[in-house]
Image: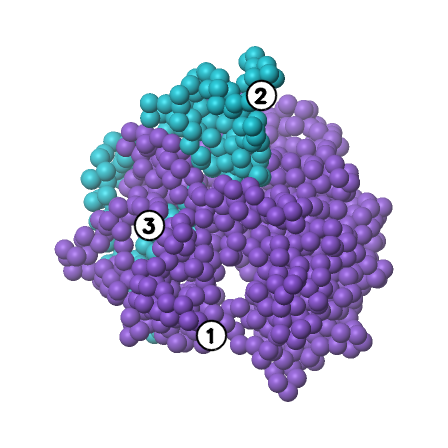
Chain colours: A purple, B cyan
């Protein structure tokens, strides 16, 4: 979240799209309702009517996978009707930047498309530079190739008729949302957007979110109280674990993973450290080398030396375009190329797409280690229904995990608050925290490499690795310390002292920090994640900032990009809900995005400090499938043509191509119904933990499928019938829940039905059903490879025989 | 006397079992004593956090004789103000669940059952698998002859159930081994 949970109460309008906040983030809704009580308008745009819809001012159902069409129409409305916040847009976004002559867009494709490689030459989308190498700007917006005018042209096609016939949303409902939300384009109004997996889990997921950012920037809603782009992050520490980047493509603190072409630390730094020629751009990532070296110094301790690139020379490197994410991991496992591995606290046999393939792929493993609280569909895949254990040669180690109250440590909430939790009781029986499993296994491996010959033992043996799992010590290391006495700006820091914040991190090995984002969370005074102080200044209290409760990254800033909440002289756009203000020569309120004085002093810096140019990117030249979001149909679509262009689906979408990866044809008559999937309040994700909790299982005991009465009539299905839902990849048994919560959509002059299914039920819980993800395809967004769980094609019929329920 | 919001929540919490408003008056400590006059009498209070969505509702765990006996929402957490959803409210039973794993289990190749093992055996056996697989499959160079230092046949999935301190070690260990197939719930 660019803002945080309690800040939602400051909003004047709330657009909940791609999320069912009331059911899946129930406590978040407390803040939605507080805003509503104060007069905020709440809108829910989602295929299904849910408890979120019930408490919103209006619910607008749309066909899954058409969010860009919907929001593209909103951008057109904002631009056509001059609803955007001119000063904000001109000064703080790249709306005024001039795009180079090579840029073009035609029939669904941007300039530079390479069909063979399904990728773009992004140089075609570059900005035009002045003689100093700074992007040219026209703040009067007269230049034909300025970003704002390119956007006007691009979204001119997103007229109400076309948007309505693509999304299935009646025109008056579109206008309701557009008018109500665009009303926040005034300096004293704020709107917030709350989204979750309903936006990310599409082959256009990243562009869904980019378009929402574009809307927010046009309306001046980023950086202000009650504004922001607010990802309702799902898992308990998915924010923190993402900050620590246990993902193939990034190192802790969002640093790019080393690639084969960057053979040395110097090469890496040269390729990854942006350079800006604009003296007013802070270009914060210029400090990246300091963060990387401090990380390596933490990993390899005294063995990290300049002559080995501080350990860079030992790190694994990925190939360009090498994709090691879920979809391709299981594709390679299916082909027999992956031999062993670890699964901690996740249940891919249930929650990865196309789980029939995933479950079969696991049979090719020689060994599997699972750290868990319970048996899961993953740990016990070898005894699943239909499998013959005698034919499955995988050795499986199932390690008992401690529960939350049996360990201490920090987790990071969706609003980036780092919070400490304490151990209430010892782990039961022989269970232990996963951190202890990781430490102990690695120590056992290190012992073998010390005792025997082995391949390339350097990174394993040179690692600074603890004997035992000690969360306090790791928390200290994440913040980091000085490795020798250093003088910075006249202050002497002694060896062993904690680094006060990341502005003091160095690229010469004198500092350790295993996550620069956390630098400042554990200074010499102690672990700030433990703070419980609710004290606030009146200005902070006015917007519920809680700066002394726990600690937020970065540097305890509660609202990101908060310098965009003030004008060029440092005065808040909306004094009634000020986040920061320049007063008597200093900033008050929240921790500002850098302490420079206001821009009109001539000594300031643009507010969007993480971008090289310092401006928020309406035009985003870094994304895989284009600099402006464009509507593409899901990879499985009930349509045969894209109403917006000749390009049916995302031209750069990722896809697995094994014999288990069939896709329904566009408009496939065998599979005419759109499927979307979701969690439940009572069951968590794949359901492994909550299905083992009797009170929760009793509340939601069985797999069901929600469908409209119209579809049920067409199919001769009664409420409560057991039905078979099938895609080209698999079939699932479910109880039919015939409900007006699902509605047919009128799309391109005909009716398209959509059904919805929770994906939490699995065979280890008897008679509750089994994985819905047996239906979903292994296709993903080109930027993230997040699978398209939210829109695929199925058919449905009454069951002749029931085995799963 | 100042009644803090937290103290007030505790006090009003026992209103339901017969506390009068008069007793809310001057001295908070007897109120607190009364408030704990049930199964949490004399229990130690420990702050933990619900392990489900990223609202991260803080909870109060009441501990008696080394065991958690009650879990309730923490009114001191400004986000939840003491509230919990159905999952958070079931947290105690998740600790005491009979379904929980208690010992390391091992399933041999082609076997149809689990056997209990101790940690020492388990760690040694896993380390042997890791080393043998890594030593066999380690790739020093890619097809273009560029240095890559990686092993593609070992993977890890998970997890956002780990604390930050567990994640930091998990990441370090995997890169140290040369693992590139690493992913977690941020992607699914």
Of tags 1 and 2, the one toward the viewer is 2
Of tags 3 and 1, the one toward the viewer is 3
Measuring from the top left, give residue A714's x and y in whole percent.
73, 32
| Mark 1 neighbour density, 10 Å: few (under 14) some (14–19) many (20 or more) | few
Side of A86 relative to A508 (left or right)? right
State the residue position of label 2: B25
Residue that appears at 77% across and 57% down: A187
Do the residues under discs 3 and 1 have CB atoms within 8 angstroms? no
Measuring from the top left, give residue A461's x and y in whole percent.
23, 59
Residue that appears at 32% across and 32% down: A426
Tell me if I can see residue A776 in this picture.
no
Do the residues under discs 1 and 2 have CB atoms within 8 angstroms? no
Which residue reaches farthest bottom?
A: A131
Label of residue A271 in the image: 1
Side of A100 relative to A400 (left or right)? right
Which residue reaches farthest top?
A: B18
Task: Write down the chain letter for disc 3.
Answer: A
Of tags 3 and 2, the one toward the viewer is 2
Task: Write down the chain letter for disc 1.
Answer: A
| Mark 3 neighbour density, 10 Å: few (under 14) some (14–19) many (20 or more) | few
Q: Are marks 3 and 2 on the same chain?
A: no
Mark 2 falls on what kind of element?
Answer: loop
Mark 1 falls on what kind of element?
Answer: helix
């Amino acid at each position: 979240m660019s803002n945080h949970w309690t800040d939602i109460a400051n909003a004047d309008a709330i657009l909940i799209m791609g999320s069912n906040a009331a059911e899946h983030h129930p406590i978040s809704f407390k803040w939605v309702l507080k805003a509503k009580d104060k007069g905020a308008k709440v809108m829910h745009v989602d295929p299904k009517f849910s408890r979120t819809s019930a408490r919103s001012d209006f619910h607008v159902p749309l066909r899954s996978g058409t969010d860009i069409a919907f929001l593209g129409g909103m951008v057109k409305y904002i631009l056509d009707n001059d609803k955007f916040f001119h000063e904000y847009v001109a000064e703080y976004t790249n709306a005024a930047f001039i795009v180079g002559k090579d840029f073009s867009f035609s029939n669904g494709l941007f300039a530079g498309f390479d069909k063979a490689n399904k990728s773009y030459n992004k140089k075609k989308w570059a900005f035009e530079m002045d003689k100093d190498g700074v992007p040219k700007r026209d703040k009067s917006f007269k230049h034909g190739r300025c970003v704002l005018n390119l956007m006007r042209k691009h979204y001119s096609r997103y007229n109400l008729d076309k948007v309505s016939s693509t999304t299935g949303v009646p025109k008056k409902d579109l206008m309701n949302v557009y008018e109500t939300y665009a009303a926040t384009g005034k300096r004293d109004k704020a709107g917030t957007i709350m989204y979750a997996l309903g936006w990310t889990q599409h082959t256009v997921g990243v562009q869904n979110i980019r378009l929402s950012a574009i809307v927010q920037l046009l309306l001046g809603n980023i950086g202000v109280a009650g504004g922001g782009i607010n990802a309702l992050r799902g898992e308990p520490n998915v924010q923190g674990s993402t900050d620590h980047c246990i993902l193939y493509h990034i190192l802790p603190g969002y640093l790019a993973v080393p690639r084969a072409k960057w053979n040395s630390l110097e090469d890496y730094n040269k390729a990854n450290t942006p350079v800006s020629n604009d003296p007013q751009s802070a270009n914060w990532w210029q400090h990246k080398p300091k963060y990387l070296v401090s990380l390596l110094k933490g990993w390899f301790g005294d063995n990290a030396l300049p002559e080995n690139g501080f350990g860079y020379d030992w790190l694994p490197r990925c190939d360009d375009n090498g994709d090691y994410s879920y979809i391709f991991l299981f594709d390679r496992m299916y082909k027999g190329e992956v031999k062993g591995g670890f699964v901690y606290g996740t249940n891919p046999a249930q929650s990865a797409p196309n789980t029939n393939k995933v479950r079969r792929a696991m049979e090719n493993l020689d060994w599997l280690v699972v750290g868990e609280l319970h048996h899961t569909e993953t740990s016990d895949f070898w005894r699943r229904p239909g499998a013959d254990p005698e034919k499955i040669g995988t050795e499986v180690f199932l390690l008992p995990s401690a529960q939350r109250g049996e360990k201490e440590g920090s987790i990071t909430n969706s609003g980036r608050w780092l919070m400490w939790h304490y151990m209430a009781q010892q782990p039961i029986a022989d269970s232990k925290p996963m951190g202890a499993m990781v430490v102990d296994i690695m120590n056992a491996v290190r012992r073998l490499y010390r005792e025997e010959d082995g391949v390339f033992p350097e990174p394993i043996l040179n690692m600074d690795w603890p004997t035992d799992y000690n969360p306090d010590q790791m928390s200290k290391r994440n913040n980091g310390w000085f490795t020798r006495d250093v003088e910075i700006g006249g202050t002497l820091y002694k060896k062993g002292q904690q680094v006060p914040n990341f502005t003091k991190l160095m690229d010469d090995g004198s500092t350790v920090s295993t996550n620069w984002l956390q630098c400042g969370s554990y200074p010499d005074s102690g672990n700030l994640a433990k703070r419980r102080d609710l004290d606030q200044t009146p200005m902070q209290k006015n917007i519920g900032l809680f700066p002394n409760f726990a600690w937020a990254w970065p540097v305890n800033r509660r609202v990101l990009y908060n310098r965009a909440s003030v004008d060029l002289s440092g005065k808040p756009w909306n004094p009634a809900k000020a986040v920061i203000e320049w007063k008597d020569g200093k900033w008050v309120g929240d921790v500002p995005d850098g302490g420079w004085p206001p821009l009109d002093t001539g000594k300031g810096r643009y507010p969007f400090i993480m971008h090289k140019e310092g401006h928020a990117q309406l035009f985003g030249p870094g994304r895989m499938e284009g600099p402006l979001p464009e509507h593409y149909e899901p990879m499985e679509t009930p349509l045969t043509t894209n109403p917006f262009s000749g390009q049916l689906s995302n031209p750069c979408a990722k896809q697995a191509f094994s014999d288990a990866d069939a896709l329904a044809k566009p408009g496939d008559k065998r599979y005419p119904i759109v499927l979307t999937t979701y969690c439940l309040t009572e069951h968590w994700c794949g359901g492994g933990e909550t299905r083992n909790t009797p009170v929760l299982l009793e509340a939601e005991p069985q797999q069901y499928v929600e469908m409209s009465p119209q579809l049920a009539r067409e199919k001769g299905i009664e409420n409560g019938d057991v039905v078979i839902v099938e895609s080209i990849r698999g079939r699932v048994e479910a109880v039919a829940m015939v409900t007006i919560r699902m509605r047919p959509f009128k799309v391109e002059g005909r009716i398209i039905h959509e059904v919805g299914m929770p994906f939490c039920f699995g065979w280890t819980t008897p008679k509750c059903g089994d994985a819905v993800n047996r239906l979903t395809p292994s296709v993903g967004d080109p930027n993230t490879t997040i699978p398209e769980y939210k829109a695929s094609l199925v058919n449905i019929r009454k069951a002749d025989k029931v085995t799963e329920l | 006397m100042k009644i803090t919001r937290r103290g007030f929540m505790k006090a009003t919490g026992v209103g339901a079992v017969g506390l009068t408003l008069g007793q809310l008056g001057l001295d908070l400590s007897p109120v607190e004593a009364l408030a704990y006059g049930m199964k949490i009498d004399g229990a130690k209070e420990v702050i933990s956090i619900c392990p489900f969505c990223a609202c991260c509702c803080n909870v109060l765990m009441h501990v008696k004789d080394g065991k958690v006996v009650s879990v309730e929402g923490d009114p001191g957490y400004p986000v939840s103000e003491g509230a919990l959803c159905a999952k958070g409210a079931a947290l105690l039973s998740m600790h005491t669940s009979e379904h929980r794993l208690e010992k390391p289990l091992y399933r041999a190749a082609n076997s149809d059952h689990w056997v209990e093992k101790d940690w020492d055996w388990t760690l040694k056996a896993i380390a042997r698998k890791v080393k043998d697989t890594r030593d066999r499959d380690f790739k020093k160079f890619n097809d273009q002859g560029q240095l890559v230092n990686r092993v593609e046949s070992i993977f890890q999935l998970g997890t956002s159930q780990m604390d930050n301190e567990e994640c930091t070690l998990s990441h370090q260990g995997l890169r140290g081994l040369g693992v590139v197939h690493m992913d977690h719930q941020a992607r699914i």
